[in-house]
Image: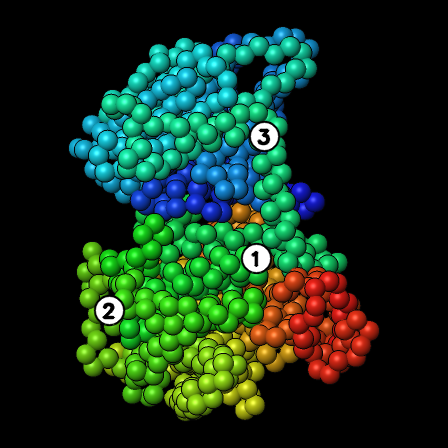
Amino acid sequence: MQYGYFDDANREYVITNPQTPWPWINYLGTEDFFSLISNTAGGYSFYKDAKFRRITRYRYNNVPMDSGGKYFYINEDGTVWSPGWKPCKTPLDSYECRHGMNYTKIKGSKNGLEAEVLYFVPLKTKAEVQLLTLRNTSSTVKTFKVFSFVEWCLWNAAADMENFQRNFSTGEVEVQGSVVYHKTEYKERRDHYAYYSVNAPIAGFETDRETFFGLYNGFDEPQTVLEGQTRNSVAHGWSPVASHCLELELQAGESKSFVFVLGYVENPQDQKWESKNIINKKPALEVIDKFDTIEKVIDSFNELKAYWDKLLSVYTVDSGNEKLDRMVNIWNQYQCMITFCFSRSASFFESGIGRGMGFRDSNQDLIGFVHQIPERARERIIDIASTQFQDGGCYHQYQPLTKKGNNEIGQGFNDDPLWLIIGTTSYIKESGDFSILEEPVPFDNEPGTEKSLFHHLTVSFDHVIHHLGPHGLPLIGRADWNDCLNLNCFSNDPNESFQTTENKTAGSKAESLMIAGQFVLYGREYAELCLRLGKKEEAERALKEVSKMTEAVIKHGWDGEWFLRAYDFDGNKIGSNENEEGKIFIESNGWCAMAGIGLEAGMVGKAMDAVNEKLDSEHGIVLNNPAFTKYYIEYGEISSYPPGYKENAGIFCHNNPWIMIGETIQGRGDRAWEYYRKISPAYTEAHSELHKVEPYVYAQMIAGKDAFRPGEAKNSWLTGTAAWNYYAITQYILGIKPDYDGLIVNPCIPADWKGFTVNRKFRGANYEIRISNPDGRMSGVRKLTLDGILLEGNHIPCQPNGDHLVLVEL
Ligand code: GLC
Ligand code: GLC
């Protein structure tokens, strides 16, 4: 069953039934002012950091679901309704929500009155703009009232939900003209406030929540709206809100539009006040002025659209398969931008309070984003590297507002450092900018400790060598990529966090085959970079370590049919046929395959076959098998999840592309594509009622074959799945890969594909790359011409600006 459809021409997903099986959301803003918005206008806004600078309130996991948002209420002769259906839930005559690239349009109608709201955050603006249009589609005059609504958050989203003894006394607002200003704590240590305006005279307002709703009412029955009468309340403590009231009359066929601006202002310390206790409103009024007419709003909306035209023009495919094209050309790239902006901090599954930017997460996000805006990737790499320690270890997360490492979550995840290598080399391959390697970057943000970024890569590489276990394999530390395989944790206290609790380290033999594969692959990547820089000795040193690791894997990491997952604290095998549960895991097999370990000896082929036989399922590849059915204290959180969920044999979509790539390494395009297709959102659309979350973006997890409801997805939007699937499909299946001095063309596709065309903008030039597959092959470039000239091999050297035609035959 579907709840809408893709409108590819407009790059929108159109939801036609508001009662989606879960709120289907979108993101507004890509710079520093952000909003999350659901298909019924639920959601919230924040500035830079969802924890420290929350602008409006939201209550996660509420009853009813998705309560709180940017609501409009209409009262026409006592019929009260909202264009997004919620919160009133008054049955509508029509409803439509269009989620587009950083904007959402919600339209509803009732009794011949239509209300449409366009929500977006204009480029370079610290505000969300809402363009509300009301149309009288009936043949008689209509008189009615419209009420806007937002609820202010008292800035720190965690304290806002905890510290009620203080919160209920601090709230402060000012109202001037049609603008409500939220200035809680501005008097003391904050120099920022928020505001909500409308570009028309208002009939009244409310700023006190209790007055607006009535103490015992829900979002669906605000007293002010039901009575059609404002009391012009001014909040003193309790819960400040902002609501404007417009009194309107529309002739038959007439329409009127209004611009609402929800903004954020930071004032310099010496310009905070206009007069005693009266805030300096100048900067807010300047923004309000910029959007005071519909024309201005439409212009800035068109700028946003043009911005996305440009971003999405860097890599486009024309394959003749509309589902594939829409994922590659639109939604997967869009999701990559969103994961770049938010890492894992704020979605409808991530509260925005628990997590900042992850070290490993953000590096991985870069591989799907770097082609869009390389300059922003550059800045991100420096930010991430600045949270590293001298020995190559690093904070697991940092807060976007302060850019400082998060002490509560700490360090010691031994895969973390290696991700910096792929983040950095991806950036250089896209941009050609080697100068980033000379950039001075501090350790732990400590001024005076700066060393070149290249040095940071060296210590990242060495961190693994300095933490080897008894088999010469990498020690796992707190965990590797799988945060739930906690081999040194031994927790039997439910009040402890598996990730942060004190670990037993002395005497640990816990080694990771996933990090081993990662080290071989990214160690070679590092060595190649060294060669490009003329650092021959360093390259040789690195390659020596890489081959030692390769040998260690072959000797101690092979179980006969597949790669082991790990050794536990006591040196027992994990992910072995000898185990009773968790005999085989996806991560180590994916990584050792991508690294090509034992490729010639047939190990990669065998391992991929074992994955196919034991881990593949109708909805995707599960993480491990058999699922754990009891708690293993020596494995930690992985065995805490019920079978089939999350890291315990869920389909963790993030790691499926590792297998896709592993298959392409051996030229098996049919299997790689089959795995791609299974978890691709466009393909899950048809069973949306089961899949539950948005059909336009990847979810972190789809319940696995051992779960109660296989195929049901959770944790949509913020997942490394976005970057990895984009990377796998564009660089390994379609096979157009940026390299230091050109593009490599190496498709690996199902034999029955006749061909496809990729348009790739790369360092100023445009390449139209037409692949044809006359003999029904899966891989191998037989012939490649560039602008009519036959080239050896499959490497296109960088060309001068302008258009170039590349013809490729498999
Ligand atoms: C979550 C974390 C990520 C981790 C993955 C697997 O997505 O953000 O860092 O690698 O889970 O446990
Ligand atoms: C839980 C989740 C995992 C996540 C980790 C850290 O263990 O299962 O996906 O990476 O928490 O937040």
From the top left corner, tell me how far across and down residue 210 is, in percent.
30, 20
Instruction: Point out which mark residue 296 bears.
Output: 3
Left or right of 551: which side holds 616?
A: right
Mark 2 beta carbon near ligand 2 (under 8 Å): no
From the top left corner, tell me how far across and down residue 565 is, in percent.
39, 77
Left or right of 140: which side holds 483?
A: left
Instruction: Point out which mark residue 489 bears.
Output: 2
Which quadrant of the view contains residue 101?
A: top right
* Quadrant location of the N terminus in the rendered image: top right
Kindly identify the amino acid type of the residue bearing the numbered disc 1.
Gln
Which mark is nearer the camera, 1 or 3? 3
* Quadrant location of the C terminus in the rendered image: bottom right
Which quadrant of the view contains residue 550?
A: bottom left
Left or right of 221: which side holds 146?
A: right
> How many numbered marks are there?
3
Mark 3 beta carbon near ligand 1 (under 8 Å): no
The residue positioned 38% from the left and 72% from the top of the image is 452
Residue denoted by label 1: 372
